[in-house]
Image: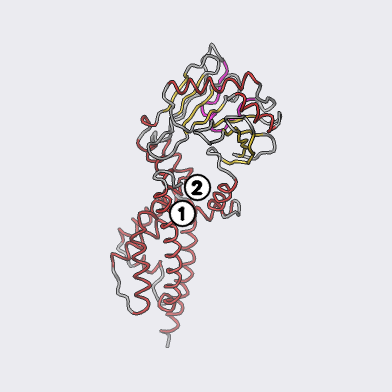
Amino acid sequence: MDEQIQSAQHAAGHHAVITAVRPAPGAGDTTRVMFTDASHGASESRAVFVDPVTAEVLGELNVYGTSGVLPLRTAIDQFHRSLLLGDPGRLYSELAASWLWVAALGGLALWLANPAATGRRKSIRSLHRTAGLWLLLGLLFFSATGLTWSRFAGGNIGVLRAQFGWGTPTVSTVLGPKTSPAVVDQHAEHNHHAMDMNMSMSPQQAKQFLGVLNSARSVGINAGKVEIKPGRDDASAWIVREIAPGLPTQVDAVSIDPHNLQVVDDARFLDYPLAAKLTRWGIDVYMGLLFGPLNQLILVVTGLGLALMVILGYLMWWRRRPVIARQPTLLTAWCEIPTPGRYGLIVVGALLGYALPELGGSLVLLLALDLVLTQRATTARTADETP
């Protein structure tokens, strides 16, 4: 392994700093050595792929995120996250996730009401309604999991999880006082740059990787796919974590003292709180990893079904627009609700708006628009009644 790392370091240049090593998980696979330097942005690094048999460098690619996704996957992820529009696109994505569950449950309520439909409208509405019923759980899942990664709602969800102890356990990289009296960030594994930025990997440091990996293997880190992350400095423990999503879930992690190869801390998936386990499984399902090709097929069908429902929804609106124009506005309908129900809606709306800021902000704008429409409708009705 040290020869593979040295070969990768030579290819990356001595200015590049190693951030992680992913040993070849099986025959025919390459070892991935990841580096970062001043040219890389946030969450970016460069992966050097090494033949574990010959230590020959086979190629280099930029990778993104803690999962180290390759350029094509990175482009797809960025398009999914922000439509390649930066922050405005990310806000739009969160807005869609915030309203998706409302639209899905609203469609269920309309189905339960079972309004009559005739003619061409009936066939379109029936298709829209049937698709919505089949896709309901998937749409709610898309909304819930998407919101956990959003900027504003995701931040509130993170605070809630931390408040109730539902967060995903992490391993400490703090070494004992005899080894290191310095105070080190306990969550450094998420943001460290793997050693001082002025240092490249020396031959002696390269030899440490195999020792650290063997130590982790001896305490149960047995997944085929693992990642070794050196400490941010000489006073920090190294981390070895499993990166094998799917079933069985293998995401255990241990921190190892590189000086004596003793275990400093560990985090086992079996010991995760239930909420953290559900979060892990939810992420894997959302990414199409938990159940393999079947998982991916279900996601594709759900996504295509949602696109079809959007098209059918606009088509129904277009055909019914004269009727819709004569229907009561939201404010008018709200006034017809009994008083307790009105106050209840205000409380629920305020709570949801606080928890999901984009939902709340857009709801305020929607109500403002509805107020204008209500005033116009009232003015028009008054004019019609005036002799």
Query: Does the magenta portion include 186?
Result: yes
Magenta residues span: 181-195
Answer above or below: position of 323 versus 182: below
Residue at horizontal 68%, vertical 34%?
37
- Spatial CA distance of label 2 from label 1 is 9 Å
Answer above or below: position of 37 versus 231: below
Answer above or below: position of 187 versus 329: above
The residue under label 1 is: 97
Q: Quadrant of residue 40?
A: top right
Q: Please say if the residues under marks 2 and 1 sit with CB atoms less than 8 Å apart.
A: yes
Say left or right for 135 vs 114.
right
Residue at horizontal 58%, vertical 34%?
32
Residue at horizontal 37%, vertical 58%?
135
Say left or right for 230 vs 165.
right
Q: Amino acid at mark 2?
A: Ser
Q: Please state the horizontal and vertical placement of residue 302, each as a whole percent of the image.
A: 41, 57
**Quadrant including the N terminus:** top right
Residue at horizontal 44%, vertical 72%?
315
Q: Please state the horizontal and vertical placement of residue 257, each as a whole percent of the image.
A: 52, 18
The residue under label 2 is: 150
Q: Amino acid at mark 1?
A: Ala
Residue situated in front as seen by the camera: 33 or 262: 33
Q: Please state the horizontal and vertical placement of residue 221, each as a whole percent of the image.
A: 44, 26
Q: Please state the horizontal and vertical placement of residue 304, each as a whole percent of the image.
A: 44, 60
- Mark seen at residue 106: none
**Quadrant including the C terminus:** bottom left
Query: Does the magenta portion include 305?
Result: no
